Amino acid sequence: MHSYWHPLGAGSLLLAPPVAYLTYFSRQVPVGFLEFWRTDFWTKLYQQSVYWYLGILFLFFLLLALVYKWNSCLKASLPRLTRPSWKLFVGFTALMTVFFLVINLFFNIDDWSHFWYLFVYQPVRLPLYIGYFFWEFTPSSRVG
């Protein structure tokens, strides 16, 4: 966990603010960088730049750790390298597509959401993040 916080902390606190400030700078908004960092960056222009995925990845890791801790079948199983069946692939693709299209009825494809300033994500892509992260734990990839 120690190595996780360095990229997220440095990226979010040191590298993302100048990227967000470019919005004001390019539009000649009369706000200095330090004032922007103290005020607007933490409200309407908060972002994590290219480091957004680290918070969601960390959340999935915590959830997986909890599931692993309480699931004896998962602990006893061994990884198996196999090619997924075409039915599983088509089913997974169809399921991800349906989730994407349904959520897209309520959110724009370019919308971003965040909570607790740590988890930044695009709502229409959240099922994709979940699906691809947990793909490894489909029945075809485990033995036991």
Image (spheres, rainbow, N blue to C red):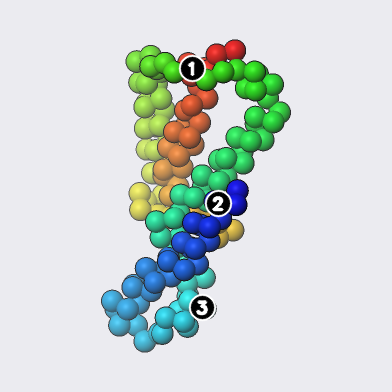
Where disc 2 sits, the SS reads helix
Can residue 87 be seen here? The reply is no
Residue at 41% over, 25% down: 92
| Residue type indicated by callout 1 | Arg
Where disc 3 sits, the SS reads loop
- Is 66 situated above or below 37? above
Residue at 67% over, 35% down: 66
Determine the residue located farthest toward the bottom in the rendered image. Answer: 30
The Cα–Cα distance between marks 1 and 3, rounded to whole angstroms, is 50 Å
Q: For residue 80, which numbered disc appears in the image?
A: 1
Sequence-wise, which precedes: disc 1 or disc 3? 3
Q: For residue 95, which numbered disc appears in the image?
A: none
Q: Find residue 85 and report its horizontal and vertical position in percent.
A: 38, 14
Query: Label 3: few (<14), some or many (≥20) within 10 Å?
Result: few
Query: Label 1: few (<14), some or many (≥20) within 10 Å?
Result: few
- Is 4 situated above or below 87? below
Residue receiving disc 2:
3
Viewer-nearest residue: 128 or 97:
128
Question: Residues at badges 2 and 1 in contact (C-beta under 8 Å)?
Answer: no
The quadrant in which the C terminus is found is top right
Query: Label 2: few (<14), some or many (≥20) within 10 Å?
Result: few
The Cα–Cα distance between marks 2 and 3, rounded to whole angstroms, is 29 Å
Viewer-nearest residue: 31 or 65:
65
Residue at 28% over, 76% down: 26
- Point out the frontmost of discs 1 and 3: 1
Question: Residues at badges 1 and 3 in contact (C-beta under 8 Å)?
Answer: no
- Point out the frontmost of discs 2 and 3: 2
Q: Find residue 99 and report its horizontal and vertical position in percent.
A: 43, 35
Q: For residue 39, which numbered disc appears in the image?
A: 3
